[in-house]
Image (cartoon, helix red, strand yellow):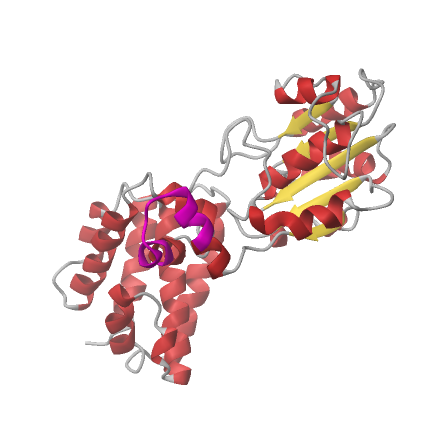
Amino acid sequence: MCTWLKLWTVRVSNNLYPWQAGLWQSLAGRSQQAHAYLLHGPAGSGKRALAEHFAQFLLCKAPQSEQACGQCSACKLYAADTHPDLARLEPEEEGKGILIASVRALVAKILQTSQQGGRKVVIVEPAEAMTTGSANALLKSLEEPAGSTIFLLISHQFSFLLPTIKSRCVLQVCPLPSEAESVQWLQQQSELSEEQCRTLLALASGSPLNAQKLLHVDVLAIREQVVTGVKQLFKQQSSPSDLALAWAKIPPELLFDWFCQWAQLILRYKISEDESQLGLPDMGVVLKHVAPRAPLALLLETQDWLLEHRQKVLRRAPLRADLLLEGLLVRWQALLPR
């Protein structure tokens, strides 16, 4: 899963993406709205845009055909990002946790009467950024929201959420679109060939939105640098410490995404010997060479280590990046016994 790209700023477009028609119907088409929804799924699947679109619909004074009218006072306030009955709960700094103080301030706000005389809507993103304390502080409001308040929680890491949070929400999974849908959409947004779109999608773990962001990042050059480094590592031409230093400016989330994928591909090929399981061609030959030679127990141990430390990276745990990368590469090099 590609997680290192910045997924939102203060506001993103609230236009729905083509693959969200069914999701929208399941939300807007309800005969009675729930008091809390949890939109969860892979990063880059369009959850924020869906939540924003839904928020405007819920606040609209004259919705038409399951869409916000776009003309009423509520829609105009929403478009200007000044609607007094719309609140957003998010970390004060990207990558940090949502503070208890922020939750308490929100709870105090939603206890007040709606200024527009309608619903109040709260968007929480990312919901997994809530600490145990801040999540517990929100529980009562989720279970018994004040007035006509509706919570829209967005989560890219569903497994990180407390069960008590999940149980108080209507769960709405937001999957990635099919590869065909993604390629078609990417081609409409760019001048890329179908093959280039498929490569970007693979690097973005299937997310067309993250693939689009990769257009503005020199990710293909980064990928080439990392693949070359891995080959040099196995040939004893570069040491783990040398590569850790050379990769110091590469987002660790990106590196862990790729190495987790590669470990999984090695394991699949080791079991199936199916070359279609080797992923992108740039690493396919390397993975095919390593698979029969890597001790199974060591491969499984390495995969567990990668997954464990990937979670720490995603949680922004206080880790020294250089030592983390060096540890990764030492384990990776050991997969190919000398």
Q: Quadrant of residue 118?
A: top right
Give percent across and percent down for residue 244. Answer: 24, 50
Magenta portion: prevailing SS class: helix
Give percent across and percent down for residue 292. Answer: 30, 82
Answer whether residue 196 is magenta in the image: yes
Q: Report the residue that reaches farthest toward the left.
A: 237
Taking the image as drawn, is residue 161 in sight?
Answer: no
As drawn, 252 above or below 260: above
Taking the image as drawn, is residue 111 in sight?
Answer: yes
Q: Quadrant of residue 11?
A: top right
Q: Nearer the viewer, residue 159 or 2?
A: 2
Report the label total: 0
Q: Nearer the viewer, residue 97 or 59?
A: 59
Give percent across and percent down for residue 86. Answer: 71, 24
Q: Quadrant of the C terminus?
A: bottom left
Residue at the spot x=79%, y=38% of the render?
142
Q: Which residues are magenta?
A: 184-198
Residue at the spot x=70%, y=37% of the render?
54
Left or right placement of residue 283 versus residue 137 in this view: left
Left or right placement of residue 151 versus residue 93 in this view: right
Answer whether residue 248 is magenta in the image: no
